[in-house]
Amino acid sequence: MSINDSCSITRSLIRSYSRIRRTRTSARRSEAGREIFGDLSRSEYPLNTVIRIAFTARWRSPVHVGGADLLDRAIIGPSDALRYMHEHFHHKSGPLYWSAFNLCHSAIRGEVRIEQARPHFVAACAEEDARHHLHH
C-alpha cells in the first residue's frame, strides 16, 4: 500500500466519522430543560452547537452557610453552590458531596429542576461541617 492510498483511506475515514457525528442525535432535553431553555426545534445537535448553561439560576430560598456558628453567606443557586464547594470544602469526596456536585451541574445544564439540587447541597454542607468538626 502506498502513502497516497493510506492518506486516501484516512481522509475517507475522517469524512465518514464526521458524517456519523453530525447525524447522531443527542438525548432529548428533559422537561426541566424545556422549562428553563424552551423547546428545541430539532432533536439533532451539530458539532458547533452551543450548550446553554443557566449560571444565574436561583433557588426559591437561599442556603445560608458559614463557619464558627455564623451563617454569614447566602448560596443562591446551583452555580453558587458549585463555587462554594470548590472553594470551601476540604473533603471533596463521599456520596453526599458527589450527589450535590452532579445535581448542581445537571441543574445548570437544564437536565433537572433547579430545586432538586438544593437539598443535596444542604446535605453535603452538613456532612462537610461534621467532617470538619471531627478532624478539629
Image (cartoon, rainbow, N blue to C red):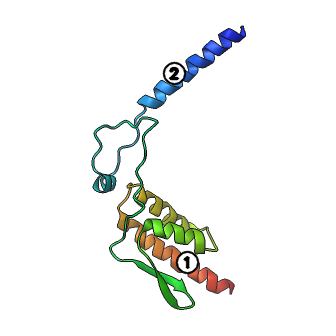
- Name, please, the residue furthest toward the right: 2
Which residue is located at x 48 percent, y 75 percent?
A: 123
- Name, please, the residue furthest toward the bottom: 69
- 75 over 134 or under it: above or below: above
On residue 42, the disc is none
Q: Is residue 110 left or right of residue 105?
A: left
* Residue 96 visible, this orientation: no
Looking at the rendered structure, the kind of residue marked 1 is: Glu
Q: Is residue 128 left or right of residue 109?
A: right
- According to the picture, the residue beneath numbered tag 2 turns out to be 16
Looking at the rendered structure, the kind of residue marked 2 is: Ser
- 25 over 128 or under it: above or below: above
Residue 134's spot in the image, x, y percent?
A: 65, 85
**Element at label 1:** helix
* Residue 88 visible, this orientation: yes
On residue 127, the disc is 1
Q: Is residue 41 left or right of residue 126?
A: left
Q: If the image is split into quadrants, where does the N terminus sit?
A: top right
